[in-house]
Image: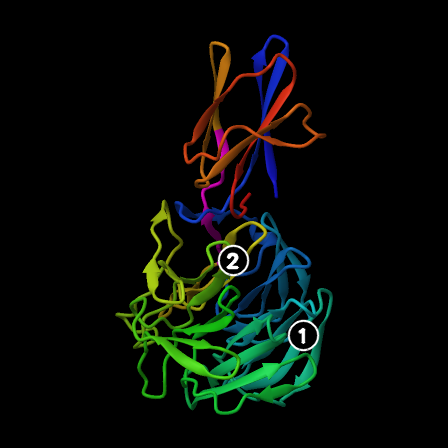
């Protein structure tokens, strides 16, 4: 947990310190934050790339995609402040499936499309161990496909892949489900899953279910239904949801709100036509239904085929790139983060013998704590938790240090 320390004179013989830690609450105001990065030190504008969160290294990984009609093979890491290029020697592909195996500490990539005319559909499986890419399966298992959805199931310790198509245009939509344990692909039979491509999946850790949304089906339509997988069977969990069907949406699990987040995507059909609609709204799935999240302030440009990953260390959904104008082949190179307004001290005011500490951001409940040393001793609660954004304190004439904590979650 990151902290911010602000000092203010409390009395002639005392010093008042407010140490502020971040929160992620049960209900709060959420906002998008655009992060500035020099063009020379960030990925090129691209679409159909992949992003996952690496918990062991505390970074969001970005790989591949298509930039100026060329498939990329570079790998980048985002640490919350900077992009760092880790490799230029990875699989050259876009429209692939991507997930992070947190038990084996590797990113897993399958399929996609390569360079050439016509675009070749790929069927290899690769793994990234933090330093090198290694091809671990050459065409076995799911085989040739693009536009598949993939996520990691920590309960069963396997990467799950669903659906896709033989090309990005959506020819031959697939409905099969496969599991990768780090050694071999195994098809899970008779799962009754939907035929779907250009969709997304995320694992709900609280409910121990894989959640699927978006894409299009064999009829050429874009269903708005939601599906869940319990490890052996798919079931249709809802028949309606966020409007627009959503090709290539971003789906991620927020462990603090215990909800699946959905951002963006494009309305189907027709892909890229003059009336095509791009989205920049945010929705949550709680296992029973979808609800749109009110978002304060500026939002990112609506995109399709962007990529994102949820960083639980900082309580932020990180998003990069995507298509903003398909007919004119315009892609984005912006980095955005979605989360709570940062919790920070907004003022410290002396009122006679007491000081009023005020803060903004975060959300209730808050707990004010104190101790006599900034670096040593146990923190002691000051009164009960509060849903207010201020509290008065009275220093006892010695050095007193205070901090405000959010009681659930964590943001910068």
Decide if residue 113 is in sight here: no
Q: Which quarter of the figure has residue 268? A: bottom left
Along the line of sight, which residue is nearer the eye, 200 or 329?
200
Magenta part of the chain: 333-345
Asked if residue 257 is positioned above or below residue 239 in the image, the reply reads above
Residue 375, percent from left and from top = 71, 30
Residue 344 lies in the magenta stretch: yes
Check the image and name the residue furthest to the front: 384
Along the line of sight, which residue is nearer the eye, 412 or 113?
412
Residue 127 is marked as: 1
Residue to which mark 2 is pinned = 255
Residue 92, percent from left and from top = 61, 75
Along the line of sight, which residue is nearer the eye, 206 or 248?
206
How many marks are shown on the rendered structure? 2
Residue 225, percent from left and from top = 34, 75
Residue visible at 57% across and 14% down in the picture: 10
Q: Which quarter of the figure has residue 305? A: bottom left
Residue 229 is marked as: none
Q: Please identify, in this view, whether the residue under mark 1 or under mark 2 is nearer the observer.
A: 2
Residue 334 lies in the magenta stretch: yes
Q: Which numbered disc flags the more N-terminal residue, 1 or 2?
A: 1
Residue visible at 54% across and 76% down in the picture: 97
Residue visible at 62% across and 84% down in the picture: 124
Residue visible at 73% across and 69% down in the picture: 132
Q: Distance between the residues labelled 1 and 2?
A: 25 Å
Q: Quadrant of the N terminus?
A: top right
């Amino acid at each position: 947990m990151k902290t911010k320390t602000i000092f203010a004179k409390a009395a002639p013989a005392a010093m008042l310190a407010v140490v502020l830690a971040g929160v992620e609450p049960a209900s709060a105001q959420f906002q998008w934050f655009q992060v500035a990065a020099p063009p020379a030190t960030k990925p090129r504008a691209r679409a159909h790339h992949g992003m996952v969160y690496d918990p062991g290294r505390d970074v969001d990984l970005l790989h591949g995609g298509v930039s100026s009609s060329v498939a990329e093979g570079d790998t980048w890491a985002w640490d919350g402040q900077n992009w760092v290029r880790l490799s230029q020697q990875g699989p050259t592909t876009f429209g692939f499936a991507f997930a992070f195996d947190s038990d084996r500490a590797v990113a897993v990539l399958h399929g996609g499309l390569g360079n050439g005319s016509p675009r070749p559909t790929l069927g290899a499986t690769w793994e990234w161990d933090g330093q090198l890419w290694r091809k671990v399966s050459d065409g076995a298992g799911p085989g040739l496909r693009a536009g598949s959805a993939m996520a990691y199931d920590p309960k069963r310790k396997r990467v799950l892949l669903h659906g896709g198509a033989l090309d990005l245009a959506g020819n031959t939509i697939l409905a099969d489900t496969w599991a990768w344990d780090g050694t071999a692909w195994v098809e899970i039979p008779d799962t009754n899953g939907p035929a779907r491509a250009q969709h997304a999946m995320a694992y709900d850790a609280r409910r121990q279910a894989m959640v699927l949304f978006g894409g299009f089906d064999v009829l050429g339509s874009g269903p708005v239904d939601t599906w869940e997988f319990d490890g052996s069977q798919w079931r249709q969990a809802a028949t309606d949801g966020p409007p627009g069907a959503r090709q290539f949406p971003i789906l991620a699990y927020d462990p603090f709100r215990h909800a699946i987040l959905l951002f963006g995507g494009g309305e189907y059909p027709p892909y890229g036509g003059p009336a095509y609609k791009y989205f920049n709204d945010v929705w949550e799935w709680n296992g029973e239904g979808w609800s749109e999240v009110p978002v304060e302030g500026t939002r990112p440009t609506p995109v399709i085929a962007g990529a994102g990953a949820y960083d639980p260390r900082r309580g932020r959904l990180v998003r990069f790139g995507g298509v903003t104008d398909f007919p004119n082949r315009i892609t984005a190179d912006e980095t955005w983060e979605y989360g709570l307004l940062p919790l920070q001290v907004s003022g410290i005011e002396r009122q006679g013998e007491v000081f009023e500490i005020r803060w903004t951001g975060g959300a209730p409940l808050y707990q004010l704590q104190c101790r006599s040393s900034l670096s040593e001793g146990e923190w002691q609660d000051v009164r009960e938790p509060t849903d207010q954004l201020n509290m008065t304190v009275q220093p006892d004439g010695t050095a007193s240090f205070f901090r405000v904590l959010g009681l659930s979650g964590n943001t910068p």
